[in-house]
Image (cartoon, rainbow, N blue to C red):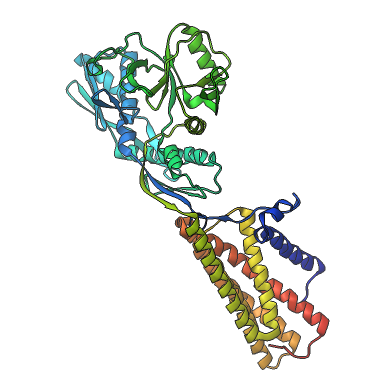
Amino acid sequence: MLHFARWKKITIAIVCVLGFLMALPNMVSESVRESIPDFLPTEKLRLGLDLQGGSYVLLEAEQKSLVEGQETKQGSKVVRKNGLVQQLTADVRSKLRDKKIGYQNLRFDGQAVSVRVRKPEDLEKALIDLKALAEPVDQGMFAQGNQIQSFEITNNGNLISMTLTEEFIERRTERAIEQSIGVLERRINALGTTEPIIQRQGLNRILIQVPGLDDPDRLRTLLGSTAKLDFQLLCEQQPTGDIDSFRPSPGCDVMEDRSQPGIYYAVHTSTTKRVSGEDLTDSQPGFDSRNNEPIVSFRFNNRGANRFARLTRDNVGRPFAIVLDNKVISAPVIREPILGGSGQISGGFSIDETNNLAILLRSGALPAKLVIVEERSVGPSLGADSVNAGFIAGVIGLVAVIVFILVSYGLFGVFANIALLVNICLIVGVLSFLQATLTLPGIAGIVLTMGMAVDANVLIFERIREEVRQGRSTLNAIDTGYGRALTTILDANVTTLIAAVILFGLGSGPIRGFSVTLIIGILTSVFTAFTVTRLLIALWVQRTRPKSVPI
């Protein structure tokens, strides 16, 4: 156990030096860190919300808005749009028209859509065609062969009812949460913050922690905006006078002007007369060169550019509306075809509004309305206090452990303390290299790891003492002590590692922060406590040829 090949010594030295170099940026000032050569690590530890300060938000997907659509006001009326029942209603209308089946009273209410077939002889055909709309949906990766129907269909005479199933609504809610997490990540990352935490909680909630963000109002604006952009042609018949008495033509919808409340437009909803903002590839804030007005420039992908060019080419001279979240930003007239796949949006924005709008459009639209359930802000001063408290606790723990080991084991205690310091450098270095977020529970994990690291040395040294008492020689006692203690050390650390991995997999927030440092600490402590101390003792034995064990 005390023999080390040359390559093993070099490997252990390289690992220790790399750990020190990765931890070094955390020990020097900003100016010194900027002067570090590019080929060396320069990343510092990322501090969590409890250490750095920032914003904490818990969002919940509004299931009613996903199913029944999001609320918009039309005069004194409140209507809902873009929900699952609206999509089903449009599918039913399209299917019955394609099959030339006469119908009336097509409507939706809650989670159900109903329609009355005019001719009794068409009822059977209508039921077959509408059942085809209820395509089965997989329940998930581990539910193969276990599919659910999107809706249940029943009829009472000529009246057909289609009710969305609870399983389908839950699955669509899960998908909406997954899509929303991706959208929110793009939005928050555009703020330039470091290491935001965005993760799902339960069926329909999303937890967001943004360390270092000192503008919670801006975060609230970005999180609460759906940002669904469309370019839609205006209908021939436009509302005038009382909006409550206005009845839009089939295939048209009424939307309010964003900057002029009380002004409404009737816009086409047909896919052939609108272009969706889903095909946007980029959007940037800027200024109009003619009047220096804040604007947002946008660019489509190839599909969107072709559709936008076709829409503007076929409708020169007609007005079309730029619609954001069911509100009209502007309604310019198409003077000439727009063939380049790019354009700009203006609408009396402020500079901050153009910045936020550009971020929202780049990140894409949220599939469901998210409401803020809980919101907290942690001030940087409180975070600094937490850092100081954690640092003091760590230093006290480190000093106590060093003194205890030194008093208990003398020279071997010196070797164990050297390995302990190497272990701390490795933990900090690995955390910095992985850009993991250090939280207050994470500091607790590091302090716990220090105790676990010397615990392994205690097992080894006590085993060596026992071998010495049995009359073994110095080399034999040391070699046997390391050999027989290895199994116990591995058993203890493997069981702790399994628990830490389970905590990481099932936990969230502070629990994950604790488990990350614990996992890294277990791996590094086994390396330092068993390998580094063994190498130091082997070098000492080779140099001094001791006659007894100073322990």
Q: Nearer the viewer, residue 179 or 389?
A: 389
**Residue 181 at what x, y percent from top left?**
46, 41
Q: Is residue 318 above or below residue 550?
A: above
Residue extending farthest to the top is 317
Task: Tell whether 2 sits left or right of 206.
Answer: right
Figure quadrant of residue 220: top left
Task: Tell whether 387 sits left or right of 525.
Answer: left
Image quadrant holding the N terminus, namely bottom right
Residue 445 is at least partly visible in this image: no
Q: Nearer the viewer, residue 444 or 479?
A: 444
Q: Is residue 88 above or below residue 507?
A: above
**Residue 363 at what x, y percent from top left?**
50, 34
**Residue 527 at what x, y percent from top left?**
66, 68
Q: Residue at x 48, y 6 (%)?
A: 316
Q: Is residue 203 above or below residue 150?
A: below
Q: Residue at x 76, y 66 (%)?
A: 13
Task: Tell whether 107 sits left or right of 374.
Answer: left
Number of disc labels: 0
**Residue 520 at what x, y percent from top left?**
59, 62
Residue extending farthest to the front is 291
Image quadrant holding the C terminus, namely bottom right
Q: Residue at x 45, y 55 (%)?
A: 508
Q: Nearer the viewer, residue 382 or 325?
A: 382
